[in-house]
Image (spheres, grey):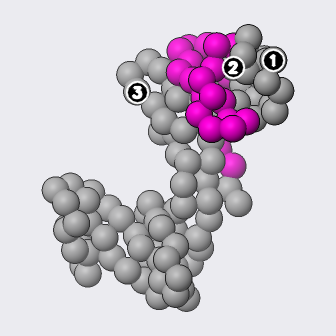
Amino acid sequence: MMRDGYVARWRGREYEASPDGDGVRIYQPEAGDGFEEVRPGRFVRILSVGEPEDVAYVRTTCTWKGEPFIVLAEHDAWLRVEYTGGRWPVANALGLEEFDFGVYQGWAPAHEVTDLREHRA
């Protein structure tokens, strides 16, 4: 699983999370104690800032064609990647799209990607 976003540990379990001012929203795919359905298959519970045991930002990084990337998503046998090398000529040579000024993204065949690692901050 490729992750890029906040997670929170609460009662010994890790949840997808979203810090929000004085609270932290945690999410799960099924109903549970104190979780409210926000849409089918998506349930949320709002915790106060001190309730989670840990809140961290998780990001998956990789190497593709010898260059550094962040993995943003996964679909079938492809990974949505964002170039972190900061060199426009390299991004251009790789055929990446300019998503925003200086931000280059594209789809990489998963079998060509190496050094997949999860980082927590």
- In this rendering, would 88 be left or right of 34? right
Q: Nearer the viewer, mark 3 or mark 1?
A: 1
Residue pointed to by mark 3: 75
The percent coordinates of residue 106 (x first, y second) are 57, 23
Q: Residue at (73%, 11%) from the top-left corner?
A: 93
Q: Main secondary structure of the magenta part?
A: strand
Task: Say whether residue 109 is magenta.
Answer: yes
- In this rendering, would 69 be left or right of 38? right
Amino acid at pointer 2: Trp
Task: Say whether residue 43 is magenta.
Answer: no
- Under tag 3, what secondary structure? strand
Residue pointed to by mark 1: 89
Of mark 1 and mark 2, the one earlier in the sequence is 2
The residues bearing labels 3 and 1 have C-alpha atoms spaced at a distance of 27 Å
- Under tag 1, what secondary structure? helix
Q: Residue at (46%, 65%) from the top-left corner?
A: 17
Q: Which residues are magenta?
A: 94-119
Q: Nearer the viewer, mark 1 or mark 2?
A: 1
